[in-house]
Amino acid sequence: MFGLSASELIMVLVLALIVLGPQKLPEVGRQLARFLGDLRRVSDDMRRQFDEATREPPPPVASLPKANPDPKGDDAAHVAPPRLEAAGDSVAVGAPSPASPQPEADKTHGE
């Protein structure tokens, strides 16, 4: 139990009796037993829920709802909206970028 041998467990109980006294020892023992019981119940419940979740097979693909990528019934899902096309037309192709720094002329050739 908890990796303790019988002699170690007896030493812990004797030490608890000395520290807590004979009046408080039964109450502390009950509290410890309640805590360990609650801990075991929570652990068992979590293990059971995990086992149930991993044991359930996934739903068959046929039972999943079918996706409708085109709710209008035409090919509108694959066409860009008109405002995006208009924005693309207003952009000038090959327009110069903002002024960028020009490289300085090589001064070593002029001397």
Image: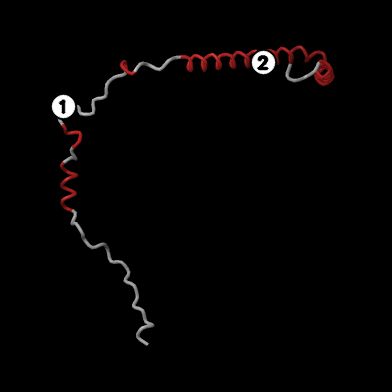
The quadrant the N terminus occupies is top right
Which numbered circle lies on residue 73? 1
Disc 2, SS: helix
Circle 1 packing at 10 Å, graded few (<14), some (14-19), many (20+), is few
Circle 2 packing at 10 Å, graded few (<14), some (14-19), many (20+), is few
Disc 1, SS: loop
Going 27% across and 21% down the picture, which residue do you hit?
66
Which numbered circle lies on residue 99? none
- Looking at the image, is mark 2 or mark 1 earlier in the sequence? 2
Quarter location, residue 2 = top right
Q: How is the image coloured?
A: secondary structure
In the image, 64: left or right of 57? left
Q: Amino acid at mark 1?
A: Gly
Question: How far apart, in angstroms, are the residues tagged by discs 2 and 1?
Answer: 62 Å
Along the viewing direction, whichever of 30 and 42 lies nearer the viewer: 42
Quarter location, residue 76 = top left
In the image, 51: left or right of 64? right
Going 63% across and 14% down the picture, which residue do you hit?
40
Quarter location, residue 91 = bottom left
Going 52% across and 17% down the picture, which residue do you hit?
50
Tag 2 residue? 36
Q: Position of residue 95 (x, y in %)?
A: 21, 60
Question: Which residue of the protein is positioned furthest toward the bottom in this rendering?
Answer: 111
Q: Is residue 27 above or below residue 95?
A: above
Q: Are marks 2 and 1 in contact (CB under 8 Å)?
A: no
Q: Position of residue 35 (x, y in %)?
A: 66, 16
In the image, 88: left or right of 17? left
Q: Position of residue 106 (x, y in %)?
A: 36, 79
Which is closer to the viewer, label 2 or label 1? 1
Q: Amino acid at mark 2?
A: Leu
Q: Position of residue 78 (x, y in %)?
A: 20, 36
